Amino acid sequence: MIEIYLLEQLDAFAHNGTLTKASEELHISQPALSHSMKKLEAETGMSLFSRDGKRMTLTETGEIAARYASRILSDEREMLDQMAQKERSLRSIVLGSCAPMPIARLIPVLQMLFPDKSVITEMRDSDDVLLQGLRNRTDQLAILHEKPKEAGIFYQRYVRESICLYVPESHPLARRQSVTLKEISGMRIVAHRHIGFWLKVCERAIPKSNLLIQDSMDAMDELAESSTIAMFNSDAMIIDGFEQRGRVAVPISDPEMTTTYYVACLDSEKEKYRSFFSSVRAEAMRAQGHEASDGTASHRGGEASTLPS
């Protein structure tokens, strides 16, 4: 059996081309690396290197060995990665989400239904990345802002969220029933950086020079309390308690400022999370009426099937 460190060093030599560069990458001395390569030749009983003075190159046999070494090391990394993913899935539930609001609402549900597992959350601004997480099994659950269309994904329609303009009561727009993006495009508006896909929506809607991105929620709170500057908030976040006294929410009527969330998992995992999806469906029905119950589906070659009760 060839020791794995010899394959690692052979691979480093193959893609660096010289002992000097390979030893620097591996953080070992050049004589130590040269000794390892001689040991590898001795263990295989074959000539892997051609030596011309101080210069050493791979023979054709050595090139074959280097290709297989790279493949073996790649398989080893994949093996360890798959083992780590399985271990994590046994001990935890990873919930990826396109926005923060659904995370805040669904973490307590998962903790109640799966008390023996830790809940890990990941914020991502792309549904494609979230679906890739499900396919790779790095995530067990995903919150999307568009209905998934691909086969093998089970989903349940969840709740809606609308971005609103959040202004002081004395603001000229405070008494409006609604505003449009065109009307507010010239205003300076504050938004939080960590709002998932919503940040891209806000950046498309408002010129960059007028959109003031904040990294800290504390800084947002201070601005809300001490300034008259307009902010982005959402109807759902206000309901959940993220509000400031003396400010009012003015709905933004443009359709891109409203989204419906969908909670998804792999079709093969839906039985494991049956109780969770039942809770999601119940909240959707309470929030949106019985029409939300039609949002439960699993795509199989374009056909949809409802979740059994």
Image: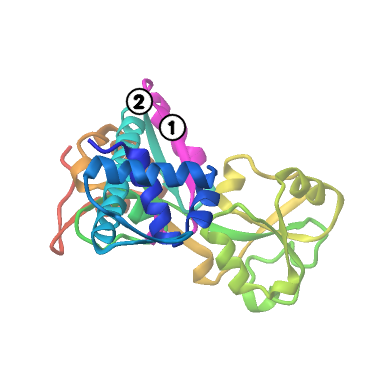
State which mark lies toward you, 1 or 2.
1
Q: Which residue is drawn at 36% across and 50% down?
A: 10
Snapshot quadrant of residue 254:
bottom right
Magenta region includes residue 236 = no
The image shows residue 142 at horizontal and vertical percentages of: 37, 48
Between residue 116 and residue 184, name the one nearer to us. Answer: 116
Tell me, yes or no, whether the two marked residues, 1 and 2, touch with CB atoms within 8 Å: yes
**In the image, farthest residue toward the front:** 53
The answer to whether 308 appears left or right of 103 in the picture is: left
Between residue 220 and residue 50, name the one nearer to us. Answer: 50
Could you tell me if residue 263 is visible in this image?
no
Q: Which residue is drawn at 20% across and 36% down?
A: 271
The image shows residue 274 at horizontal and vertical percentages of: 24, 35
Image mark for residue 119: 1
The image shows residue 40 at horizontal and vertical percentages of: 31, 43
**In the image, farthest residue toward the right:** 226
Q: Tag count in the figure?
A: 2
Amino acid at the residue labelled 2: Phe
Q: How far apart are marks 1 and 2 (CA)?
A: 9 Å
> Helix or strand or loop: what does disc 2 sit on?
loop
Residue at label 2?
114
